[in-house]
């Protein structure tokens, strides 16, 4: 078995939320391992190209930090949004728990949908309201310009490939440590629903959330608003580190902390470089889409 299969979990090594083993076919592991090898090879070539480009055309990172630091977001906006999200969470999640507590087998899926309403949809709604009230354009708030869209899409794809070799390698090491400590890989609740016998409509909704809604809302919140606020207080390296750690821990899934921390750092660096929120959104969407595709392939 190749070392890359440790990233995926040994055959039949994955466990669901109930600690039951998830059966994985050997041919699926070989197929996904081959995909990872191809992704690593492509990523290494892209990384060499990025480093060569940066050496030929050095980036003034101090200017990029100052540019993002001037984005029109304040701690008052962040605190207000956090308070609104907490109130929504208490109202909606509490209501769903009360309503569905007697419906066996329904609560998990319903709660996951409610959480997307509280978090992802609410973030987008709050941001849109703020932009309209303050008469801010998407370019002023997030560097999002329609004329730059093709270039930003290309940058997102390139930066995603460039980040993956480090993400894959250190995820492999992290999984080795977890296994040594006796912590078997477990899938997240949303993946359990996607790979289980949930209603087709529910599975389609969560695919849309993972590939479209979550990248859009989370990047606007973490990179678009959170990163500029932290840059003003502590500089680039501590800001990126703290934000990436918070992003990883907030997913409440120990096996994913390392890859989420690393990919979050890559999202932040890409935003610093490009100045456009579209770039980390594209990276995030690709990251989630590939992970969903891999889990689907492994589940058969």
Image (spheres, rainbow, N blue to C red):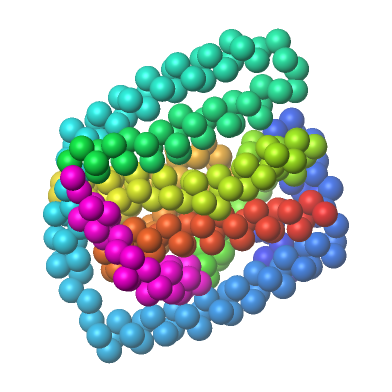
Give yes or no for residue 151 being in the magenta stretch: yes
Q: Give the range drawn in magenta.
A: 135-163
Q: Where is residue 176 in the image (x, y as percent from the top left)?
A: 62, 55
Dividing the picture into quadrants, the one containing residue 199 is top right
Residue at 66% across / 29% down in the picture? 109
Camera-side residue: 279 or 182?
279
Q: Is residue 155 above or below residue 10?
A: below
Question: Which image quarter is the N terminus in?
Answer: bottom right
Q: Is residue 256 magenta?
A: no
Q: Position of residue 150 (x, y in %)?
A: 40, 73
- Left of 18 or right of it: where is 85? left
- Between 157 and 147, the one lying in front of the other is 147
Secondary structure mostly taken by the magenta-highlighted segment of the chain:
helix
Q: Can residue 283 be seen in this view?
A: yes
| Residue 16 seen in this snapshot | no
Quadrant placement of the C terminus: bottom right
Q: In this view, does 289 lie to the left or right of 159?
A: right
Q: Is residue 122 positioned above or below 9 on the image? A: above
The residue positioned 81% from the left and 62% from the top of the image is: 28
Question: x, y (%) of residue 10?
Answer: 76, 55
Residue 194, position in %: x, y? 70, 42
The residue most toward the bottom is: 56
| Above or below, comparing residue 90 to residue 205 in the picture | above
Left or right for 253, reference 23: left
């Amino acid at each position: 078995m190749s070392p890359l299969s440790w990233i995926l979990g040994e055959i039949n090594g994955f466990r669901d939320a109930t600690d039951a083993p998830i059966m994985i076919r050997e041919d699926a592991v070989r197929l996904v391992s081959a995909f990872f090898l191809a992704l690593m090879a492509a990523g290494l070539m892209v990384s060499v190209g990025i480093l060569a480009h940066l050496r030929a055309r050095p980036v003034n990172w101090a200017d990029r930090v100052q540019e993002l630091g001037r984005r029109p977001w304040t701690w008052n906006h962040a605190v207000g949004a956090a308070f609104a999200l907490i109130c929504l969470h208490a109202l909606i999640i509490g209501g769903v728990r009360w309503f569905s507590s007697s419906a066996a087998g329904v609560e998990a899926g319903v709660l996951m949908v409610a959480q997307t309403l509280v978090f992802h949809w609410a973030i987008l709604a709050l941001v849109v309201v703020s932009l309209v009230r303050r008469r801010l354009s998407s370019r002023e708030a997030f560097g999002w310009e329609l004329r730059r869209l093709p270039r930003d899409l290309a940058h997102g794809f390139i930066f995603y490939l460039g980040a993956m070799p480090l993400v894959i390698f250190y995820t492999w090491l992290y999984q080795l440590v977890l296994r040594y400590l006796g912590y078997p890989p477990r899938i997240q609740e949303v993946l359990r629903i996607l790979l289980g016998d949930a209603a087709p409509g529910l599975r389609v909704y969560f695919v849309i959330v993972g590939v479209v809604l979550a990248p859009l809302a989370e990047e606007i919140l973490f990179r678009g608003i959170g990163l500029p606020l932290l840059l003003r207080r502590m500089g680039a390296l501590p800001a990126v580190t703290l934000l990436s750690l918070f992003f990883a821990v907030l997913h409440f899934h120990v096996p994913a902390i390392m890859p989420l921390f690393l990919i979050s750092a890559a999202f932040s660096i890409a935003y610093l470089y490009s100045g456009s929120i579209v770039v980390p959104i594209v990276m995030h969407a690709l990251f989630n889409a590939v992970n969903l595709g891999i889990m689907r392939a492994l589940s058969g």
